[in-house]
Image: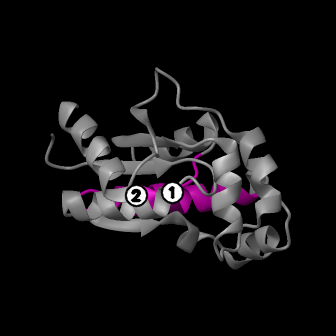
């Protein structure tokens, strides 16, 4: 594994980005950033009200996400939905060495997880997330990992894949 990794753990709401990303960051001994914490207040208010974000809402936020990832001197892990290729390209514009790890989870399981937690993203927005989701392409930097099993187990599978890069 190279000395510095900039990793985006991605997927729709409820896929486990924050939990797996935080565990992976601990394993790699790098910083962890939850991109949810970087949303402007207007975005959080919009989602809390059950209104999906549009690209015009996402662009400034994705620029901040990319810059935050780029500015981590020792590398790091960012949990960010990065649902569409154009969003991943926006992050790559700021952090060209980023690697994306898509957590794959069955749609029914996503809904179950969303209903079981307290978060500004209501379960009603799951459909908009699924509609926006463009799975990681074979020509994009990264790979998909099923988020099944324990958090540490999933983080370990990601670490093993990163060690192959």
Q: Nearer the viewer, residue 12 or 6?
A: 12
Lateral position of residue 149 relative to residue 42, left or right:
left
Q: Quadrant of residue 88?
A: top right
- Residue 16: which disc? 1
- Residue 116, image x and y in percent? 66, 69
Q: Nearer the viewer, residue 38 or 81?
A: 81
What residue do we see at 64% from left, 33% from top? 134
What residue do we see at 67% from left, 39% from top? 133
> Is 141 part of what is drawn in magenta?
no
Lateral position of residue 94 relative to residue 122, left or right:
left
> Is 73 part of what is drawn in magenta?
yes
Query: Where's the N terminus, which quadrant?
Result: top left
What residue do we see at 77% from left, 62% from top? 123
Q: Quadrant of residue 107?
A: top right
Which color scheme did the rendering employ for the protein? Answer: one colour
Is residue 51 shown to the viewer in this render?
yes
- Residue 155, image x and y in percent? 32, 51
Question: Which residues fall within the magenta stretch?
Answer: 57-82
- Residue 105, image x and y in percent? 57, 43
Asked if the residues shown at circle 2 and circle 1 are in contact, with their CB atoms under 8 angstroms apart, the answer is yes
Mark-to-mark CA distance, 2 and 1: 6 Å
Dot 1: few (<14), some (14–19), or many (≥20) neighbours within 10 Å? Answer: many
Query: Where's the C terminus, which quadrant?
Result: top left
**Circle 2 sits on which residue?**
20
For the image, the number of numbered tags is 2
């Amino acid at each position: 594994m190279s000395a510095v990794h900039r990793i985006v753990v991605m997927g729709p709401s409820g896929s486990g980005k924050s939990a797996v990303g935080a565990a992976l960051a601990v394993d790699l001994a790098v910083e962890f950033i939850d991109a949810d914490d970087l949303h402007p207040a207007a975005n959080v208010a919009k989602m809390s009200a059950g209104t999906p974000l549009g690209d015009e809402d996402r662009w400034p936020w994705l620029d901040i996400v990319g810059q935050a990832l780029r500015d981590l001197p020792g590398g790091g892990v960012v949990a960010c939905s990065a649902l569409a290729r154009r969003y991943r390209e926006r992050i790559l514009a700021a952090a060209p060495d980023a690697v994306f790890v898509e957590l794959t989870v069955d749609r029914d399981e996503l809904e179950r997880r969303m209903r079981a937690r307290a978060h500004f993203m209501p379960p009603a927005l799951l459909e908009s997330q699924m509609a926006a989701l463009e799975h990681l392409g074979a020509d994009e930097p990264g790979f998909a990992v099923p988020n099944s099993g324990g958090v540490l187990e999933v983080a370990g599978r990601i670490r093993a894949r990163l060690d192959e890069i």
